[in-house]
Amino acid sequence: MTTPLRLGIAGLGTVGVGVLKLLTTHAERLKERSGRDIVISAVSARSKNKDRGVSLDEYTWEDDPVSLASRSDVDVIVELIGGEDGPAKALVEAALENGKHVVTANKALLAMSGQPLAERAEAAGLSLRFEAAVAGGIPCIKVLTEGLAGNEIDRVIGVMNGTCNYILTRMEAEGLPYEEVFAEADKLGYLEADPTLDVGGIDAGHKLALLSSIAFGTQVDFDGIAIEGIERIEIADIRHAADMGFKIKLLGVAKLTGRGLEQRMSPCLVPKGSPLGQLQGATNMVIFEGDASGQIVLRGAGAGEGPTASAVLSDIVDIARGYRVPTFGQPADTLRAARPAIAAAPAPFYLRMTLLDKPGALAKIATVLGDCGISIDRMRQMAHADRLAPVLIVTHKTTRTALDEAVSAMEATGVLQGTPVALRIEVI
Amino acid sequence: MTTPLRLGIAGLGTVGVGVLKLLTTHAERLKERSGRDIVISAVSARSKNKDRGVSLDEYTWEDDPVSLASRSDVDVIVELIGGEDGPAKALVEAALENGKHVVTANKALLAMSGQPLAERAEAAGLSLRFEAAVAGGIPCIKVLTEGLAGNEIDRVIGVMNGTCNYILTRMEAEGLPYEEVFAEADKLGYLEADPTLDVGGIDAGHKLALLSSIAFGTQVDFDGIAIEGIERIEIADIRHAADMGFKIKLLGVAKLTGRGLEQRMSPCLVPKGSPLGQLQGATNMVIFEGDASGQIVLRGAGAGEGPTASAVLSDIVDIARGYRVPTFGQPADTLRAARPAIAAAPAPFYLRMTLLDKPGALAKIATVLGDCGISIDRMRQMAHADRLAPVLIVTHKTTRTALDEAVSAMEATGVLQGTPVALRIEVI
């Protein structure tokens, strides 16, 4: 009989409680599957007495989560506190220091400190796993690291922030403005404490950085991602996109080319009927394109108690079964430093801007585009009551560099109010 | 430095050649990922001199595949011969006998002999892995066995025979009759040597049986599947379905209830806009519904050199990394014997039949349905030139048992020509 695997769990919010429940209700099945008992030795959270709907009586309580790491009755630290530093980081470091495996749902921590933490774990022969950090219940880390290990990965694509997708699909379905749906999402508790993490594309960017590292064998490089949030998307954009057969999604794309590692996280137009276009609400989608496997599409709940707990359990069962896979799929000291590159592949772009109603204004904009070598597929000036004319332009294929130049030049003409909204049209 | 993992590969058809190519072209990446060299010691196939577009010069050749199993320079047998017995089975048995791990793409062998083979492998402390046997490049075995190990699985759903889906989507797109598209598929080499394996639903049934075992902790029970093929689907059925907003797919569904293990593989109507309804050509889709994870949808190429080789490599890399997971996700001797049960959940059904043009014929059919407690949602008798009238009926929700009774009773009335086509309408 093998010995039980003993956990110390830090953080008893939604996910932590979900993990406790699964470990309790599924104890027998988990034992059958992993070949040993999985037990909880000790737990820690901010408040001991909060009613969580589960009993903590059987577990030792630690006020300080970091103390879990020095307990001799703990083999694995399950870090569900969150945050890129503070107690979460201190706990993970202490755990690796003290010979404990780590399972975490903390994308921010790994996106910022994944490289040194992975090196430390591997030097000590320990597992540092993070299935729950990316795309909730979808086992996309496992699929990429193990299921597609025989491939060179050509591209990673993902809609990985459920809150943004909820906001965008609800704006469309109800015809509500961004601000109103944002307030609604806030009230429902869908937003992070700092909401720019969600709507600013940062949370999804953390996830993309982790996938890139595994896919391309590069060191996690969050700072190398060209990030744009959904804050400037208006209901008008969603409607224009729909008229042309598209939906707007906060889309992450990563690709390694001879020029370097391209990583971008930004709102894009995708065909309405495509799998990405059909994603509703908080559902996530992750797509891996392997040179042998072809396109593998994964869809599932991106957050929530059950799905995230399911991902945490997957890592715990792997450790119980004795798997030891390097954090990013190959030894951390073999990961190459990523050289960030701007996406070079040309694409059509959607542009929306507000023109001051001056003679020759539209001509000036058209001239700027021509000067930057960008040709126009269609252009439409809306009817307007005041002196501000909304203008919509769809370009033929062009590069992001040319487009950014054009946008700067347009602003310099003095005929625009504000900055144009520029969205890539992605045909996947 | 760890020692290399040494393979003996049997079967050098499309998949075998794909595996050779990946091992050669991706040798460096594979080494980074698995921490050791993966090398081929020996190969075997029917003909040594056939031009396969790859050189075999570096590998020892064995005329008899079973001889690979006794070579001291082989750690893992990669069985890509196929077939539920014969040399494939002899090789796998010999491999386990001689202490070699086995990686196979052979769904028929595992669907028929998975239980004793898994027991043997586990008794000897060996891996017997089969990612490539189900849904080509989609790592669905890994997702189910490991990624969802923390869940009770409520239901498994899949479109897992690319050939059938190719035939059905092509019939619809081109308006061609079944026979013609079947002949076309045959010419393209899409069909198994015995085509009833494909169009009869047997190949897809083998795959479902394997997924059921892992999902529910039951012994593989291929004979317990209610199997129906696509041979009787006519272009008229596809058109009627389309008129009502549905597509016809060869759909596998498995579920464990208090009554037993429900497994069915049969053509069904699914909503046009659903992920299943949108599957085109040879693409496969596998859906797992976990009690914690919720619905996880996986989509990818179901066959072909690259995708299947990618799946084989996933198993090989796992073995190289030292993973040892029981074949069906828990020790084979803990798998429970499955008690087959007929699907009890009621559903609407689509019925097409040919009525002899006799007075009162339609009334007789309607009466039979009423007598069996089945109420009619809609009914349509087509215009007809001869004395045979095609009739289309969509029922309200009813059970398969009631429906089968009704179909028998209808046939007994003597007003039908042939047997009605009855397809379940599945809203997933």
Image (cartoon, coloured by chain):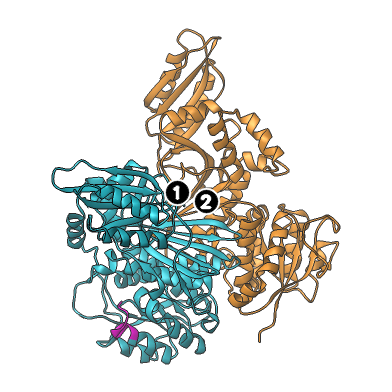
Chain colours: A cyan, B orange
**Which numbered circle lies on residue B174?**
none
**Number of numbered discs:** 2
User: Residue B292, can we see it?
Assistant: no
Give the x, y percent position of residue B421.
53, 28
Vertical side of B395 occupied by B124: above or below: below
Residue type at the position of mark 1: Arg
User: Residue A399, can we see it?
Assistant: yes
Residue type at the position of mark 2: Arg
**Which numbered circle lies on residue B259?**
1
* Magenta span contains residue B162: no
Which of the chains bears the disc numbered 2? B
Give the x, y percent position of residue A365.
30, 52
Disc 1 on helix, strand or loop? loop
Which of the chains bears the disc numbered 1? B
Pointer 2: what residue? B339
B160, B99: nearer the viewer: B160
Question: Local crowd at mark 2 within 10 Å, few (<14), some, or many (≥20)?
Answer: some
Report how far apart the C-alphas of labels 1 and 2 lie in the structure.
Answer: 8 Å
Give the x, y percent position of residue B176.
59, 28
Question: Local crowd at mark 1 within 10 Å, few (<14), some, or many (≥20)?
Answer: few
Residue A188 found in image quarter: bottom left
Give the x, y percent position of residue B138.
55, 57
Left or right: B234 in relation to A238: right
Q: Which residues are magenta?
A: A82-89
Disc 2 on helix, strand or loop? loop
Vertical side of B380 occupied by A211: above or below: below
